[in-house]
Amino acid sequence: MSAGTLPKPERTAEPGFGRPQVFAVAGCYFVASFAALGLPPYLTEILPELGDRGARWAGVLYIVPTVFGALGAPLWGRLADRYGRKRLLLRAQLGLAVSFLLAGWADSLLTFTLALVLQGILGGTFAASNGYLGSALQGPALSRALTLMQGSARAALVAAPILVGSLSGWLSPHRQYALLAVLPLTAALLLAALPEPEPARAAEDRAEESAPQVPPTVSLRALYVLEFAFVFSTVISFPYLIALVDDRLPGTSPTLSGVLFALPHLVYLVSALAVHAAFRDRPRAGVVLGFTCVALGLAGHGVAASLAELIAVRLLLGAGLTLGLVSLSVLAADCARGRAPGGLFGSIEFFSKAGAVAAGVAAAAGSARFGPAAPVLTGGAAAAVTALVTLLTAPTLRTRWSR
């Protein structure tokens, strides 16, 4: 190949936007997520203070922010593309602060429910953060940033319940909503100092348009299906894991149960960047392997009868979680080329949250009818089917499901 036909190196970041800005966005998402991720597990303690003595509405209220977040994410994404990603990211952080304040000072179940609805509608910090990053980064730089964002979410999911539990000795989880509202407010102040990513330079755009266009590894529709299926398969095991551990190991301490819950997320934190380096050029293989590990890990939950076995299957689930999330981030960055990032990541967030809602409903129904092992077996079956379909349809994922 002659020098004149060599493709131009892909631009991966806007000038003035690098690792410090990426870490700042991920750090702001981490601190802003504490109330959103750390307080819902304590709804059974919050609701009796608001008149629901038996906490009968805990299961419904647990998914209220997710439902309304899914409905609002595509709209906020399109508005970010139109009015500026930084502006809409700041809006999301301030929206969380307002909803947390209202939840913390609510004196009735109706007001508290309204606060959770507003949290879903006005929040959306994850999609807003990804849209902001997607406007400044592309290719491997973007997929690595998305991997870091998922790590931020995993870290918050592990640390937030511990912090809330530690504070509950002197301040009830209900009132902690108001206290923790300072975190998204602080994040908004920090994000205000970051730049608004500038549009790519016209000359570079024309050069890229004249170069041969490589289609994405999977179509956008295929990405949405994979996102939904992966979130469904993994999240379905969350709500009733503690009950499953108690069923298999009676008398297990809450601390040990919490450690078992956190293990898959800890696997992600320690291995995500290494997995990204290994699979950024073969994300489809990573997705299939991830779904396979999730299927085997969840199936193992159904038969594990000792602490060692539970640790082993939780670690296997963590491997699947890491492979799947990292590979989906690479596929999302691949699909982001040439698309408005706000709308794209808003839509991805819609399907992600839809998968979480479906998982919560399926987990509740399955557990009530068949016991605490039903959710993990359902998730394992869904992951196995998705892995098989993805493997068999790999050559047609670009064409048959074209946008």
Image (cartoon, grey):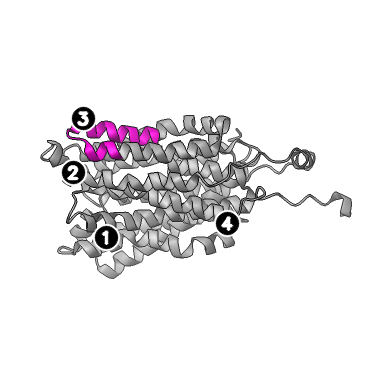
Query: Which numbered disc, 4 or 1, marks the residue that appears first in the sequence?
Result: 4
Give the residue furthest to the left. 53
Q: Which residue is mark 1?
A: 258
Identity of the residue drawn at 38% across and 32% down: 121
Q: Which residue is mark 2?
A: 46
Q: Which residue is mark 3?
A: 110
Q: Name the kind of residue labelled 1 in the image.
A: Gly
Query: Which numbered disc, 1 or 2, marks the residue that appears first in the sequence?
Result: 2
Report, in whole angstroms, how far the alpha carbon at label 4 lies from the one at label 1.
Answer: 33 Å
Question: Contact, CB < 8 Å: mark 4 with mark 2?
Answer: no
Helix, strand or loop at mark 1: helix
Asked if the stretch drawn in magenta spans residue 94, the answer is: no
Q: Specify whether 28 is left or right of 360.
A: right
Q: Which residues are magenta?
A: 101-124
Q: Specify whether 134 is left or right of 154.
A: right
Q: Name the kind of residue labelled 3 in the image.
A: Leu
The kind of secondary structure the magenta stretch mainly shows is: helix
Considering only vertical position in the picture, is 145 above or below 369?
below
Query: Which numbered disc, 3 or 2, marks the residue that appears first in the sequence?
Result: 2
Identity of the residue drawn at 38% across and 64% down: 315
Q: Name the kind of residue labelled 2 in the image.
A: Ile
Report, in whole angstroms, how far the alpha carbon at label 1 lies from the one at label 2.
Answer: 20 Å
Observer able to see residue 136: yes
Percent from the top left, x then y, of residue 166? 23, 59
Identity of the residue drawn at 45% across and 45% down: 189
